[in-house]
Amino acid sequence: MFTDFYKLKALPFQLTPDHRFFFSSSVHSSAMAHLTYGLSQGEGFIIITGDIGAGKTTLVGHLLSTLDKEQFVAAKVVTTQLDADNMLRMVSSAFGLPIENIDKASLLRRVEAFLRDTVAVGKRCLLVIDEVQNVPVPALEELRMLSNFQIDGRTPMQCFLLGQPQFRRTLASPDLEQLRQRVTATYHLASLGQEETRSYIEHRLKLAGWDGDPKFSNEAFREIFAYTRGTPRLINMLCSRLMLFGYLEELHEIDGEVVLKVAEEHANETRQIAGLEPKAAPGWDGESETAAEPAKTEIPIAEPEPEPEPEPRPVAPRAEPRLAPALGGFGRQRPNVVPLKEVAANRPAEEPDAAPPLIQAEVLSEVREVREDTAEILRRLDGLEQHARSQEKLINKVLHFVVEQIGEILRRLVDLEEQGQREPPAVPAPTVGDATERIESRRDDGRLPPELRAEPRLADEPVLRRRFRRLKSGQPVGAARQRDDD
């Protein structure tokens, strides 16, 4: 929707990895250097780790797109929660080998034959394992065993392992000592800095045909970095929402306030999906709805001293709490307590400095809980109202678009109708007199059948009329004559 409004040729901020939008930042350039070095070694494992959305898949996709297909055969495995045997089958299937109805020994021989044929034509195999943090240790050992193949003193296959930082803990396992010795290059992708975040956004916009509309202010770039912390996928998500918000509001400049509003809505939606209270996302220094939470005044409550219990004194009857049920389940039911005013009224005057009774502590605790629950209800209502307003604006936009399309269709129908009225009038249908003249002319030049060349009798006039109508409608004369004879 916003691509037409901003005159873009493509979506600039897709969440799925696309190596065509690769941005050569400082960290990604360093990672490319490590990958290139690992490829030059021609053997072993190359490991790239990074947080979720750091750009690992895009990085390797860009590398594979630059390789000469006459020298490399690449395959990729994404489904990684597999045991050792299924991992072997997935690798074989990724290289296009049949895996149905075959045991493991036969499959290994088939893989070895494929690697031998690949080396024979002067190529090398590259295997990419994505989300490697989910691969169990036995499956990793199966991959290491595949790297043991040697053909004419050369290793026919290299393996790229892409995963999140926890894979480093898996790699440190004592069971993977042999695999660690085969690692030729490793690199951890860090997040982008503030200046590179701005360059990254402008880079993707320019590739999509951006000509400066919408304009992003310096404050907008700072707020985007503050919310995303330089993670490419989060940047794509937030900027895509900003472009959509700008289209709905018909904005041609994105400033810091717009970024704060959109980021706040996303953070609250995410937490509502998770069933949590709306507040700012982790690591974001911007304001959020929770900042408006009323300050809680802590009332000091003196703990009762370990002295003998005082003599009982009359107190007012206990009252049923009425606030908790009204909150719809947010508050917790507590035992009946004595109202604070009644406790104060019944306190003896000769004990002004006595510590408040334990029942007062329960009342104050109940009041604090009611305040917290009320604030929670207000926050959720505010979030729902904002979401409803956003949806209403989107629906209005869609309805406006539909009305415009219907108007355009009606205008085209009117034009077509006017064009139809300007066409020349249709030729009038021939009369019986015209038909008689045509028959006479055909009788004279011999184009009529022999039985019609004679002068028609009065009894033959209905037959002639029927045949004339059939000739006019394009039916064969022979078929018409046969029906008339019948």
Image: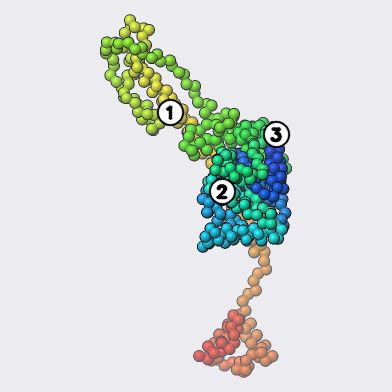
Residue 424 shown left or right of residue 93 in the figure: right
Q: Give the residue number, with chain letter if any, for mark 3.
A: 195
Nearer to us: label 3 or label 1: 3
The 10 Å Cα crowd at callout 1, few under 14, some 14 to 19, many 20 or more, is some
Nearer to us: label 2 or label 1: 2
Q: Is residue 100 above or below residue 249?
A: below
Q: Look at label 1 and name its amino acid.
A: Asp
Q: Give the residue number, with chain letter if any, for mark 1.
A: 373
Q: Give the spatial CA distance, label 2 vs label 1.
A: 53 Å
Element carrying mark 1: helix
Q: Residue at 71% x, 45% y: name it.
A: 37
- First in sequence: mark 2 or mark 3? 2
Q: Look at label 3 and name its amino acid.
A: Glu
- Report which quarter residue 300 is drawn in: top left
- First in sequence: mark 3 or mark 1? 3
Residue 253 shown left or right of residue 383 in the figure: right
Nearer to us: label 2 or label 3: 2
Q: Residue at 35% x, 28% y: name it.
A: 333
